[in-house]
Image: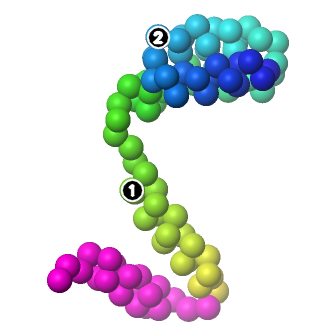
Amino acid sequence: MRSLALRFRGIFRSRDPSKRDSWIGDAVNSGLVAIERFARVLQRDLDAVYNPIELSWSNGQAGGQINRLNTIKRAMYGRAGPELLRARMLPLDQNRHHTK
């Protein structure tokens, strides 16, 4: 299992998509149920597997904003309604994008 995990990580680090198909084949035939299941899920959406390997684009900015919003929502859960959430979010957005 360790060698499969290291190879999988290596595919992303080297950004070499040609190794992806052989890894999926080896994983499906590994005899390790969890790894086989993971590889079969990857086979269902190969574009989603190729994109992070080949493209330099990332959804990290969107993910960071969503994480920030969810953190605020969790902190306020059960305390107030949407008005307080808006009041808490808007000042953050205005200060973040404000230029002098």
Q: The N terminus appears in which quarter of the rendering?
A: top right
Residue occupying image coordinates x 49% and y 22%:
14
Relative to 92, is 29 above or below? above
Relative to 29, is 13 above or below? below
Quick check: 8 left or right of 82?
right
Relative to 6, is 56 above or below? below
Amino acid bearing label 1: Gln
Residue occupying image coordinates x 64% and y 86%:
78
Q: Position of residue 4 (x, y in %)?
A: 71, 19
Quick check: 80 left or right of 82?
right
The secondary structure that most of the magenta stretch takes on is: helix
Real-space Cα separation, disc 2 to disc 1, in angstroms: 28 Å
| Magenta residues (range) | 79-100
Can the viewer see residue 82 in this picture?
Answer: no
What residue does disc 2 label?
18
- Mark linked to residue 69: none
Amino acid bearing label 2: Ser
Can the viewer see residue 34 in this picture?
Answer: yes
- What number of labels is visible? 2
Q: Going from the N terminus, do you reach mark 2 or mark 1 first?
A: 2
**Observer-nearest of 13 and 86:** 13
Quick check: 51 left or right of 94?
right
What residue does disc 1 label?
61
Q: The C terminus appears in which quarter of the rendering?
A: bottom left
Q: Residue furthest left?
A: 100
